[in-house]
Every structure is written in C-alpha cells, then in structure tokens.
Image (cartoon, grey):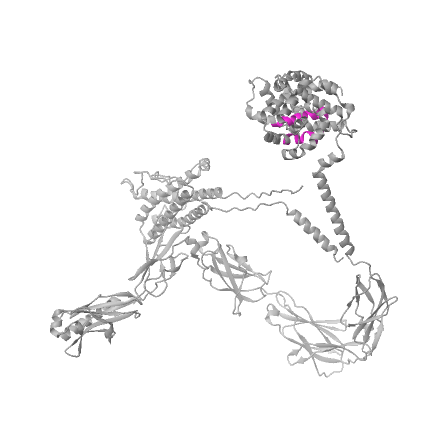
Amino acid sequence: MDLRAGDSWGMLACLCTVLWHLPAVPALNRTGDPGPGPSIQKTYDLTRYLEHQLRSLAGTYLNYLGPPFNEPDFNPPRLGAETLPRATVNLEVWRSLNDKLRLTQNYEAYSHLLCYLRGLNRQAATAELRRSLAHFCTSLQGLLGSIAGVMAALGYPLPQPLPGTEPTWAPGPAHSDFLQKMDDFWLLKELQTWLWRSAKDFNRLKKKMQPPAAAVTLHLEAHGF
Amino acid sequence: MLALQIWLVKALLIFLTTESIGELLDPCGHIDPESPIIQRGSNFTAVCVLKEKCMDYFHVNANYIIWKTNHLTVPKEQYTVINRTAASVTFTNVVSPNLQLTCNILTFGQIEQNVYGITVLSGFPPEKPKNLNCIVNEGRKMMCQWDPGRETYLETNFTLKSEWATEKFDDCKTKPDTPNSCLVDYSPVYFVNIEVWVEAENALGNITSDHINFDPIDKVKPNPPRNLSVSNSEELSSILKLTWINPSINSVIRLKYNILYRTKDASTWSQIPPEDTASTRSSFTVQDLKPFTEYVFRVRCMKEDGKGFWSEWSEDASGITYEDRPSKAPSFWYRINPSHSHSYRSVQLIWKTLPPFEANGKILDYEVTLTRWKSYLQNYTVNDTKLTVNLTNDRYTATLTARNIVGKSDTSILTIPAYDFQGKLMESKCYLITVTPVYANGPGSPESTKAYLKQAPPSKGPTVRTKKVGKNEAVLEWDQLPVDVQNGFIRNYTIFYRTIIGNETAVNVDSSHTEYTLSSLTSDTLYMVRMTAYTDEGGKDGPEFTFTTPKFAQGEIEAIVVPVCLAFLLTTLLGVLFCFNKRDLIKKHIWPNVPDPSKSHIAQWSPHTPPRHNFNSKDQMYSDGNFTDVSVVEIEANDKKPFPEDLKSLDLFKKEKISTEGHSSGIGGSSCMSSSRPSISSSDENESTQNTSSTVQYSTVVHSGYRHQVPSVQVFSRSESTQPLLDSEERPEDLQLVDNVDSSDGILPRQQYFKQNCNQPETCPDISHFERSKQVSSGNEEDFMRLKQQQISNQNSQSCASGQMKMFQEVSAADAFGPGTEGQVERFETVGIEAAIDEGMPKSYLPQTVRQGGYMPQ
C-alpha cells in the first residue's frame, strides 16, 4: 500500500472541509440605484468649499468696508438685517427637522442670500473684488442647484418663491452709509453661519442616507442530520 | 484672408479688363457662382456670362470663351456652350484647395482677353470633435482640449459650450491659432457638475461633439508643493526628512504625492513607493539612504482619489545624510627600511584612505597599536596615512582603525614577522601558504593555498552512521576527518556494506560528500557498513556500523490503519443515523408495545361513557375508512410529531396506540387535550414487562367503546357538562397550589392553577384567557383581544395540558411538553378542524373525571 499517513490525514481534512462547506451560504448581492447619497456628499463638499472661499472673500470685503468692520473683535448688534434669513436655530428644533424641511430651509435661505449678494456685487468698488464676488455668486448659484438636485432626487418639490416677497437690494433712503455697511457686514456673517449650518445639515443627511451595513446572515442548514 | 485674396483677384481682373478695353469700366461679363466653396473631391460647374455690349465690341460670342485655371487653359472637352452669351465649365473631383478660375475671350483672332475671375475654395465639413477633456489649473481658469478631426482646409470655428443643470455659461470661442483648445472665461465652481461640449462649424456644415459631464474638482491640476526642504537626523544616518507646504487647494481636497530622489551625482531618479505617500501630508521621512551622502528630492501632488492631474514637480531640494562610523577598516601594510642597528629596525606602516562610501563621513584620524608578542602595547594617533616606527627584531602585531565623528571602524590587523623568521616543515602536516602582493601604493588581496610536504594515508578512518533508515534504503552520514588525522588530501571514500550472509558491496563516494543513500536494501535485514578514506598515498578503514532495516516503511502502518478506522467510523456513523431515522420502524420490529393485561381497567372505564363519547365523536370526524380502529385518529390528532412525519408514522402509531389505548383514553384523555405522548410513556412505564401485542381483552374494550359511542354524536354538550365537575374537582388542589398567591378574584385561582402546572410561562396566561373567554363572564378587567387569543390559546393549550399531565403523571418533559406545542400548531393547520379543537377544550377536563374513577385506584 503506497498510501502514506499524510495522505490519509489529507483525505480526512478534505472530508471535513466538504462537510464544513455543506451549509448553504446565500450570496449577498446588493446592487441598485446609488440614490441621492453621492449628490448629498457633493453638496456637503460644496458647502465646505464655499465656506473656505467666503473666508478669504469676507476678509477682502471687510477690509474694503474699512474700520471698524475689519476689526477682528467687531461684533455689532444685528440691526436692520431682519430681512436676512437667520441660520441660528435651537438645537432641539434643528434636530427635529425632517429632511424635506431641512432642505427647503436651506434652499430658501440661499435664494435670498444670493439676491442680496448680487446687490453687494453691484456696489463693490474694485474690479478684483467684483470678480471674487461674481465667482462667489456663481458658486452659490451652484450650491442652490445642488440643493435643488438633492431635493429632486428625494422627490421633494422646490419651494416656490411667493410673489411680492422677492427680496431686493434697495436700501431705504433712511440708510446711512454706515448702516449700509452694517448690512453688508451682516450679510457676510449670516452667509458664513448658513454655510456652517448647511455643512452640518448635509453631513446629517449624508449619514442618514448611507445604506445600513449589509447584515450577513448565514443560514446554516445541517443536511441530513 | 481668403476674402481678401478673392477681392484682390477681382480688383486685378477689373483693372486688366478696364485697361484692355480702354474706356470700359465694367467687366465684360461675370462668372456664376461668385465665390464658391465646395467639398473636396466633388464636381464643380461655373458659368461665364458675357455682356452684349462687349460681345458686339469684340465680335465674339460664348463659343469664344476660354477657361483658365491658375493660368493654364482648361481643355475644351470640359466646356459647354449654353447659349450665345453663356458657356460653362465643369471640373470633376476637385482636389486643389485653392483654384483660380478665369473666364477669357479670344478677340481679334488670337488675343486672349480676361473677362472675369473667381477663386474656388475646396475643403471638408468639420468632423465630430473627439476626446474632449478639460483641465483646471489650480487658481486659474478651466481649459478644455479636443481632437478636431481631419483638416478641413476651410475656416472652421470651434465653440466650447458649457452649462449647469440650472444655468448656461458664456461660450468659449477658439482662437484661430489654437483650434483644438479653449480657455473658458470663468473660474469653475468645484463640486458642481458641469456639462461641456464643442460645436464645430464651417461653410460646409456644423457638428457637435459628445457632451461630457464632470465635477471640475475631478479635473484639477494642483499647484506643486512649495518650499521643499530637507533635514537630516543625528540619530539615524540613513534617513532624511522632507517638509513642504501644500498648495492651497489642500483645504478643500485631500492629496497624494510622488517623491523622487537621487544622489547628487546620479542621473536617474528613484521613486518612493506611491502607496507610502497616498495621503495628505506635509512631510515625509525617506529611509534606507546611505550615510554622509547628498541626495536631491522633488515632489508633486494630485487629488487623493487619482482623479485629476499630477501637479508639476516642485523645486529640487537637497540634503546630506548624517555621518556613520566607517563601515570598513583601511587596507594596511608595512615596509621595512634597512636599519643601521642590529637590535632595531625601522618599519613604515602605510594604509590607504577609505573611499567615501566606506568612510561614511569625514575621517578625523587613524589609531595604530603595536603589540610585541603578546606583551607590550604602543598606541599612536595619526592624521596621515603612514607611520614610521622603530621596532625590535621580535614579531609584532599592528592594528589600525579609522575614526570619524560618529565612531571607529573595525580593526585591520597586520603581523610583522620577527627578523630571523625561518620555519621547519614536517611531512604529512597541512600547511596554509599565504602570499600577499605588495604594490607601490599598498598591498593587494592575499591568496592562500593548502599544501603538504609529503602525504601519507589517514591515521584514522571515517566513522559512518545512519542518519535515517527506511524499509529499502538507508541514509549514511559521516564527518570529515580532522586535519590532524588526514595526513594528506582526502581524494575519495569507499563505503562497504553487506548483510550477515551476503557479499560485500563497495561504493565509491567523492570526498566532498558527507552523506550517501544506500538504496535497494532488503527490508527487515541486518546490515554492516564501514567506510574507508583515501589520500593519494592510501586508505584507512573506519569502524564497522550495523543497522537493521525495518519491516514497514515509515507511515505505512498509519496509512493502513487510519483509512480503516475512518471507514469504520463512517460506517458506524451512517448506521447510527440510519437507526435514528428509522428508530420507530426498528422499535416496532424489535420491541412491539404490549399492554399489560393485569393493569387493564375495563371495569372502571365502562361506566364512564361521557368521555368515550367525546373520543368517539372526534374520532369519527377524523376517521378514515381504512382504519378499523378509530382510536388511531384520536391519538394521531394529539400526536406530538409534526405533520409530515405524522402521516408516515400513522401506521406505526396505529399499532402502538391500539395497545396503549386502554390507558391513553383514560390517562391521556385526562389532560387538557389528551396528549397521546404522555399516555404512551405512561403506559410504557407501566407496561415495562409486557412484550406481547395487544390482548384480546384490550382491543375488545376499545371496540366496544367505540361502537358503543357511534350513535351518540352529541359530543360537545357533554364535554362541557363535565366542567363543573372539573371545577369542583380541582378547587381543593387549586387552593393548595395558590396558597401564597394573593388574589381575591374568583377566577384567579384557576389561572394560577394553570400557571403552576405549566412549564412555559408564555403559554399559561393564554390558557387562562381562553378559559375566561370560554366560561367566565365577559366583564373581565383585563383588556385583551379575545378572538385572537382564543386562537393562540388553542394552540398553546396543548402544551399546558401536557404540563399538567406531567405534574400528575410524572411524564418526562421531553416526551410530553416539548413536542406538544410544535405538534399542535402543525396539526391545526393541516387538519383544520378548529371548531373541534375549540370544543376539545372542555374535553380536556374529562381526564379528571376519569381519573377519579379509573386512574386513582392505580
């Protein structure tokens, strides 16, 4: 007999392996539509990018406005900026927002802010600043489109602007130059806060939309036992 | 440009014509079409129309027209005279890009007069632009490039168009010198997808490229890393640390890098493995560098996910690794100068400087020691590469080490022999003769050889032993003979081996071997082996060694035993499995259940007809024509086995139950749902000594019971009538069991009773609900969905009932309780007579009545 001990153990190992693999393991096959996940991720990245962009733009613009607006500890009361959409919200309220409301608030806020910003653009003095503002406006327009895209992907309708409430950059004659600058200051500040908030909003949405980790279920069916 | 050309030609013609005709300012005719652009390779026809006035003046008509292209006359065959004033010319397959066509008339005999001229341009319509791709140089505008396709030979405009889903951007028109790229006017917005395409247009047509849609961030070419600097480490001479400043785009994307390095003098670059630099960083430590070597580095970056473009290389930066101790001792030699004294000699020690890759730094000095024959030590520290010392005529050992700022090299040793060195050589002793060449600038590498003055046979033979003994082979091994006993160069070995009775066999083995395998040996045999070593002068035997080959090869026994054991194991396993699966069949064949006639209670059963009625009625509902004994169905209905097996084992149980029916109808029937399983086991318990099949008496009883009950179909009313009996029966026991349960409700005690009796807590409340819904007023304080729970309780009641049984009859849980629930569910689905089971509930109290009459006496 040419069989060696090793061969026998090999045969036994082989037998055991076969037995071990008898239980049917259903293959996991998760394919399908990527869903709104990628576009949410992109929108999140865009808010971060805009935030970064705004940081340098605001620096330039506040310098253009001159003191005291460009002083780091300048923190005036929010006067005459009531028409600006507020980004600050109670944490509990923010947490309890549903996806639709969250996206709608973002969309509306940026529509308004964009209008104000275009007014700012018209007033800017230097060509360089106008160029930066124009690019930022375009980017913000992109963000608006991105949010619209996410809303469309989730099947939410876009909020319709109410006629007559279209914000216009037409400061009343009562506005002094200083108050005008104050408005500009607040616009930039509110924009910054909105971008921070949006980053959080989209981060939250992103986490929510992530598909849950595929649960691995092994159906161990002992055949013949 | 072309228009200008055409205009010039016209002006020239007009000028010529005007001059030739003298006072006439108008041309003598014209060519139609005026400025044609045609597709290359197509046919073209032009018509020259003469003016009447001119024809009269020159006395010509259309027949006098001569066409010329680029001053060459067109053959007459291509002409067609249309009428008196007009003639046409046709060109086929026009390939010339630029054709000057003139219409002339032959006047006054042979004088050619130019009438009109045009330029025919030919080319192709634009091809679809391909391979459109864009690049965004960080901080600059986006540039897109494409492949414009074949040359059109015509003025072709390319327009790059771009838009968002929500917005269109301005067109980008190419400049004539760069028709395959366009620098868009706006800075792209990252993270927003943009759609871009190219439109090409010329006189012969227009066409649009495929649209591409991308996120500009995925087309970014970052700026190169800035301020690359290199620093070394005093701790490690093999590393250099690179630091740089990332481009500002790093604030919105993550980067990966390529790092190249080379030594200062090398021309080719080495690359750091890209996987080591695949994430954002601003420094990197390059390892495994040579000490005290200058390296040059450059780095570039791109978006971490590989989308986009590599940046340009950064500025080169260089750095020198820190020093390390010299890796090698310097080569070392001596020179003896002629001396004036007899007792001293002047010795000059000389060595070479280490090359940079061995010095590993700047050599500060050399240390030389001189030792006179194990005693006297002299130390010298030298900056030069030579040292002259006065030595005695004794033998000296000199050592040399080189030292740099980090440490000393290894030591090189040199022996300076004594002045009067002379040797006495002996026969059959091995001498190592070493010759070292000495060149002008130092010693060369020494060569050695072994030599004998005169050889002799070895003084001892090699000792052979077995390394491994197999069934048919043996591996022999031996040690090389020590130099002392070799007495010469061992040229070969001879191995002699033999069995006790057989002839001796000799094998010659080369002297380089220390191992040899004897093959084709006989198994289970004693062998004797010895070995002889030969020098040139003769050989010497070693001691004899004996070994026995085994009967079986290694592992052979295991190879036989293991499969046999496995086969046995498998057979046993299969046998057990088979027995397990067919245990009922086997049981039936080997141990048929036989009731114990001495324990039958016919006399006690017969008066208690009400329970029989119950069984009977139920049996009839289930009854199959095949079964003569209807009690089978009753047992079947309560059988613990799940349905599919039930059907199979129906026949088995049939026989079994026949024998046990005497008890099962009495005891099994005493549970809530009269589980047959407990009854079987109880009867097994009781009938352990029985070994014959059902007795006549027993079967008679059952039959008579059934027959007796056949007419009476009123089952349910009767069974319900037993409940008061149960109540009264169970009360005393209830109270005992529920002693410590504080409850004033009249119903609770019963609930508790079931709780106490059931093993499964979940099932028990159900039965209590059921009970209440059945018999207690609807004004219960608990809110429950009665119908639903009735269903559940129907299923669960069985288990409770089994539990009860267990308590009363000490049936093992495995037999009675566990299977009860499962089996019950199956049965409900398959039999589907829920009404019967609902009604069966009261029936479950029958046992108590029976117990009183029939069971208790046992």
B197 horizontally vs B81: left or right = right
Q: Position of residue B21 (x, y in %)?
A: 13, 74
Above-or-below relation of B462 to B552: below
Image quadrant in which the N terminus of chain B is located = bottom left
- Whether residue B363 is visible, yes or no, is no
Image quadrant in which the C terminus of chain B is located = top right
Above-or-below relation of A165 to B91: above
Q: Position of residue B765 (x, y in %)?
A: 61, 25
- Whether residue B281 is visible, yes or no, is yes
Please state the total of marks drawn on the protein image.
0
Give whichever of B225, B491 is nearer the camera. B491
Give yes or no for residue B452 being in the magenta stretch.
no
B803 horizontally vs B69: left or right = right
Q: Position of residue B592 (x, y in %)?
A: 75, 32
Secondary structure predominantly adopted by residues drawn in magenta: helix
The residue positioned 71% from the left and 17% from the top of the image is B607
Give whichever of B846, B423 is nearer the camera. B846
Picture quadrant of residue B413: bottom right
Q: Position of residue A173 (x, y in %)?
A: 27, 40
Above-or-below relation of B599 to B114: above
What residue range appears in magenta? Answer: B795-822
Give whichever of B234, B470 is nearer the camera. B470
Picture quadrant of residue B662: top right
Seen as rendered, the residue at the extreme right is B501
Give yes or no for residue B804 being in the magenta stretch.
yes
